[in-house]
């Protein structure tokens, strides 16, 4: 059964301490911490142009736009229902975003899209077969017809030389993400492990590379999300609630 959103199957949620209003599917793929942390990791500045691949309902680009004023946003989404939600969410939040319905695996998808300063994605990351049409949850997590290399290649094709491409991935896939970015002509990588608590192994990573970059890579100290009592650390609260940037240098 398809798990796409219908008019009676959505919820209205708030991100960044209420700064972002997000209408998203009640079931299937829903935005979580990954989208907010990815947006905080993109080193965009006021007045720049950014592109998101596979934007879903728009959580990541909306969080980025809430943190950095005056951005020009292009967002690409394959699923018609999710693209419609993203457009509605952009309008509701006063975000000047152009949401394009296209499949990044299609070589023609990038045609006509403007050059950007930064690109980013929360791509499908687990190898697997092509999901059924409308299977939003599986499509959001399994590569299907577009491997990580295709996502990196698409974003790099729209980013100007010297611009950045950022991904959020499971820690187990950071090597595949790094290889995909290198293949797309991006280097000088920055890896930020995301640890659920102090001393714990990272479950997610944020990975950023610069188009044409030739400098050495860096592994940053792990960003710890939770205190021992389960609450968010002050550093995580600053990002998740107060719209602070995350290792944006």
Image (spheres, rainbow, N blue to C red):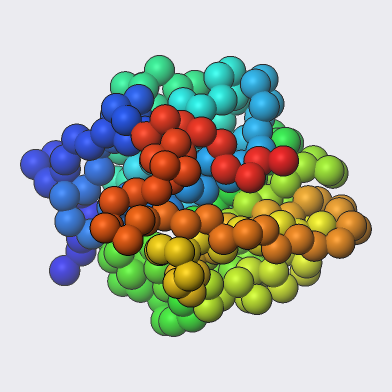
The percent position of residue 164, horizontal first and vertical second, equals: 72, 46
The percent position of residue 189, horizontal first and vertical second, equals: 75, 59
- Which residue is depicted at the point 37% across and 34% down? 241
Q: Nearer the viewer, residue 103 or 225?
A: 225
The percent position of residue 222, horizontal first and vertical second, equals: 57, 61
Q: Nearer the viewer, residue 240 or 114?
A: 240
- Whether residue 103 is visible to the viewer of this picture, yes or no, is no
Quarter holding residue 245: top right
- Which residue is depicted at the point 23% across and 54% down? 4
Q: Left of 181 or right of it: where is 122?
A: left
Q: Residue furthest bottom?
A: 128
The vertical placement of 12 against 32, above or below, is above
Q: Nearer the viewer, residue 150 or 203?
A: 203
Q: Residue furthest front?
A: 228
- Which residue is depicted at the point 41% across and 63% down? 197
Tell how many labels: 0
- Which residue is depicted at the point 84% across and 44% down? 161
The percent position of residue 156, horizontal first and vertical second, equals: 72, 52
Q: Nearer the viewer, residue 196 or 37?
A: 196
Which image quarter is the N terminus in? bottom left
Which image quarter is the C terminus in? top right
- Whether residue 16 is visible to the viewer of this picture, yes or no, is yes
Quarter holding residue 111: top right
Q: Left of 7 or right of it: where is 123?
A: right
Q: Residue furthest left?
A: 8
């Amino acid at each position: 059964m398809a798990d796409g959103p219908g008019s009676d199957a959505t919820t209205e949620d708030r991100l960044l301490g209420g700064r972002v209003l997000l209408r998203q599917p009640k079931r299937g793929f829903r935005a979580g911490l990954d989208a907010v942390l990815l947006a905080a990791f993109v080193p965009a500045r006021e007045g720049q142009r950014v592109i998101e691949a596979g934007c879903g309902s728009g959580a990541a680009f909306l969080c980025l736009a809430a943190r950095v004023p005056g951005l020009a946003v292009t967002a690409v989404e394959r699923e018609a229902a999710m693209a419609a939600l993203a457009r509605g969410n952009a309008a509701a939040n006063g975000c000047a975003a152009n949401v394009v319905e296209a499949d990044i695996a299609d070589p023609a998808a990038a045609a006509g899209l403007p050059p950007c300063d930064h690109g980013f994605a929360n791509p499908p990351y687990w190898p697997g077969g092509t999901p059924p049409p409308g299977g939003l949850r599986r499509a959001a997590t399994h590569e299907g017809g577009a491997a990580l290399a295709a996502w990196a290649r698409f974003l790099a094709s729209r980013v100007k030389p010297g611009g950045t491409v950022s991904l959020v991935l499971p820690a187990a896939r950071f090597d595949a993400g790094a290889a995909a970015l290198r293949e797309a002509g991006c280097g000088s990588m920055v890896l930020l492990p995301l640890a659920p608590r102090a001393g714990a192994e990272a479950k997610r990573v944020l990975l950023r590379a610069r188009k044409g970059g030739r400098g050495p890579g860096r592994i940053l100290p792990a960003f710890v999300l939770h205190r021992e009592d389960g609450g968010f650390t002050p550093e995580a609260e600053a990002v998740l609630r107060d719209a602070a940037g995350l290792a944006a240098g």
